[in-house]
Image (cartoon, rainbow, N blue to C red):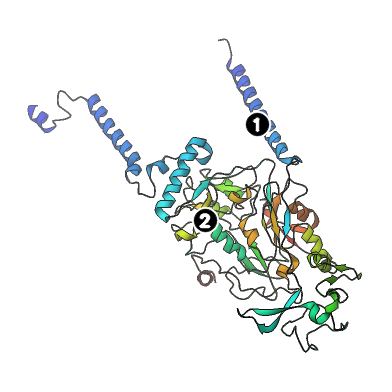
Amino acid sequence: MSDSKASLPIIDHPEVNRRRFLKTAGATLGLAAWAAAMKPLLELTPEVNADEFLQKHYRELTPEQKTVVFKRLEEETKEEYNADVTISDPQPMDNVLFGYALNLSACIGCRKCAEACHIENNHDRASNNSYIRVFEMDMGGIDFEKGNANYDHPVPAPGKYYMPVQCQQCENAPCVTACPIEATWKEKDGIVVVDYNWCIGCRYCEAACPYHARRFNWEKPEIPAEEVNPNQSYLSNRIRPQGVMEKCTFCLHRTREGRLPACLEACPTGARVFGNLLDPDSEIRWVIENKRTFVLKEELGTRPRFFYYFDE
Amino acid sequence: MNVSAGKMLFIVGLFSISAFAVQMFASVENSEEIAIHPKADDAPLFPVKINPANQLAEIPTDRKDANGNPVLVSCQSCHGVRNPNPKNGSTGPLVSFHQDLSFVHGKLVCISCHNPEGSYSDFRLASGESIKPEDVMQLCAQCHGPQFRDYQHGSHGGMTGHWDLRKGMRQRNHCVNCHDPHKPAFPLFRPAAGPNDRFPPHHTKETHE
């Protein structure tokens, strides 16, 4: 017996009974599981620091926490882009529901809106990204399969019309329902926004959007310091991190302060009309009530707040 | 506690139904709140300014001054002494001045808009009424009614500034900022650069077809 005791020193040790063995093994496993769970914290790169990792969802942040988060983001922008920026947090206005209308009879396809969006919203320079995609379409129908967003010739070309497509700010937004972690939601003024720091980049929303309005940051956006738009807001045009979704917000950092969106100001033909759908005297209401308006893919039931119209 | 299981279930059910009803009521309240019209507040509105049309009182000659700028001459120096040709609608018959002007605007003639009875720098409506250069939009509006109507409702012509005039002003284009009155058709544009898609269009075509 003494030999066998020597060969199994732990189990048969008088001090170690079955209970103690299980306790020790359990504690070891628990410790290992805890270590594994905490491992991501050790692997944090400078791009994902502990503060960001532990940051709460935008809608759970208190005003004090927001101040801290915005300050951190401003410092990071200074560090990574060498640009002094201000990150604000304009709130939805009371009794305001934003609507946008676009006159297809006036649009000539010059892409000035897409270019203005690129600059205003701090898009990656290399990809020439923009929230607006202008389709060159054959007159006589709306067939996006035959639409071309990469045309490069003087416009307007004969037999063609031009259809800029951006986020339609749907009342019934499929992208919001698709998000598994509620990183995107509809605000009180109708704008669908993304918490870029909460987004995990699964791209479900991109697949859910029937308008192809959402973009994914495949790379870290590269913008020269002097070209960074310093007037930024948390939910709209601040420089997005790599690996998250982004989308048009009707320039909420401008429009929630009463200004017109950048794409409208850039339009040389005045094809774009923006305003408050709840104000019966607004230009957008006049267009909806007096012009032949339609919404894109109405049959899907997304109820867009972006309207297209024709002149007579 | 003498509460039976059935009673307990009933109470729990009652609670959940009432909670549900409260939520329903709350959502109805919310949608009603959104549907009301904005209150007409007395906040002063900022102005909508229209870019001024270029004043037309002088035209350049082929002479240059010491700085290389063309010497300007007043309309009156010629038109004050010459009789107007009411039929002329092009620069063809003209032997001096306006040689570089190309005129493609319907079947209009010079004096359809320019007032020969005034100082030629003024304009004349179809009714014969003379109007000042700053009111020239009326001149356009007498033929282009639908465009003028759309303009008045903010759905024609570019603008910058504020959608909410309680917060700031708005600057609007004048007709002649975009349309040359002598050649009003919009020119062709070279479009801004398109997207640099991750998968260029010819690639997707190859894989799809």
The quadrant where residue B41 appears: top right
Q: Position of residue A68 (x, y in %)?
A: 45, 40
Q: Residue at x 48, y 40 (%)?
A: A67
The image quarter in which residue B13 lies? top right
Mark 1 Cα within 10 Å, few/some/many (few <14, many 20+)?
A: few
Chain of the residue that carries numbered disc 1 in the rendered image: B
Observer-nearest residue: A111 or A57? A111
For this rendering, which residue is in front, A141 or A196? A196
Label drawn at residue A229: 2
Q: Position of residue B109 (x, y in %)?
A: 84, 80
Q: Amino acid at mark 1?
A: Gln
1 and 2 marks on the same chain: no
The answer to whether residue B90 is left or right of residue A119 is right
Classify the position of the C terminus of chain B by image quarter: bottom right
Residue A264, compared with residue B104, is above or below; it is above
**Which sits in the foreground, B182 or A13?**
B182
Residue at 47% from the left image edge and 46% from the top image edge: A197
Q: Residues within 10 Å of mark 2 (few under 14, many from 20)?
A: many
Q: Position of residue B97 (x, y in %)?
A: 75, 84
Q: Do we see residue B146 in this rendering? A: yes
Q: CA distance from mark 1 to mark 2?
A: 42 Å
Residue B147, compared with residue B9, is above or below; it is below
